[in-house]
């Protein structure tokens, strides 16, 4: 019987286009559930795919500090996240969360409003 050889999976090897990088980051944002270190790790994966030295240069950071910030072992500052996202050629977009919007709507529909006397 032959032995099966396996190799470690590295998502950075599969992130080739800006669209793939954006889709990966979006998927990670949906799965993170508020875990900033998880998002930092995802940004690190994308930065490795693009080239860590290039991303560090474009973000105005040292390569070493970028590796530390995006290791997933810590939560980088928001300013660092914004610099990295810009250096990666990505943008952030906001949209209403359907889950919260539904909860908010159901709460407000049951409220009664009182008018103040002027």
Image (cartoon, rainbow, N blue to C red):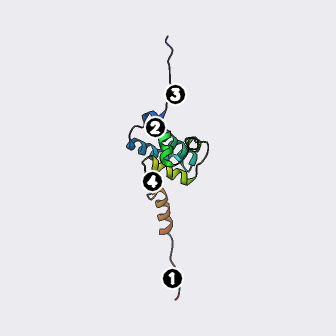
- Which of discs 4 and 1 lies nearer the camera? The answer is 4
Q: Residues within 10 Å of mark 2 (few under 14, many from 20)?
A: many
Q: Mark 2 — residue?
A: 49
Q: Residue at x 46, y 61 (%)?
A: 101
Q: Earlier in the sequence, mark 4 or mark 1?
A: 4
Q: Mark 3 — residue?
A: 8
Q: Earlier in the sequence, mark 2 or mark 1?
A: 2
Q: Earlier in the sequence, mark 1 or mark 3?
A: 3
- Which of discs 2 and 1 lies nearer the camera? The answer is 2
Question: Residue 112 location in percent, x, y?
Answer: 50, 75
Question: Residue 95 location in percent, x, y?
Answer: 43, 58
User: As displayed, is residue 65 above or below residue 14?
Assistant: below
Q: Residues within 10 Å of mark 4 (few under 14, many from 20)?
A: few
Position of residue 108 in the picture relative to residue 37 (left or right): left
| Disc 1 element | loop
Separation of marks 4 and 1 at Cα, in angstroms: 40 Å
Q: Earlier in the sequence, mark 2 or mark 4?
A: 2
Q: Is residue 35 visible?
A: no
Separation of marks 4 and 3 at Cα, in angstroms: 30 Å
| Disc 4 element | loop
- Which of discs 2 and 3 lies nearer the camera? The answer is 2
Q: Mark 1 — residue?
A: 115
Whether the residues at callouts 1 and 3 have beta carbons within 8 Å, the answer is: no
Q: Residue furthest top?
A: 1
Q: Mark 4 — residue?
A: 92
- Which of discs 1 and 3 lies nearer the camera? The answer is 3
Separation of marks 1 and 3 at Cα, in angstroms: 64 Å
User: As displayed, is residue 56 above or below residue 109?
Assistant: above
| Disc 2 element | helix
Separation of marks 2 and 4 at Cα, in angstroms: 19 Å
């Amino acid at each position: 019987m032959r032995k099966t050889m396996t190799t470690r999976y590295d998502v950075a090897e599969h992130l080739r286009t800006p669209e793939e990088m954006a889709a990966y980051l979006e998927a990670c944002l949906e799965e993170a559930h508020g875990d900033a270190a998880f998002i930092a790790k995802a940004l690190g994966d994308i930065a490795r795919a693009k080239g860590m030295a290039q991303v560090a240069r474009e973000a105005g950071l040292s390569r070493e500090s970028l590796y530390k910030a995006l290791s997933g072992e810590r939560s980088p500052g928001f300013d660092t996240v914004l610099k990295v996202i810009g250096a990666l050629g990505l943008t952030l977009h906001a949209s209403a969360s359907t889950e919260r919007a539904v909860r908010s709507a159901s709460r407000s529909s049951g409220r009664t409003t009182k008018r103040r006397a002027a």
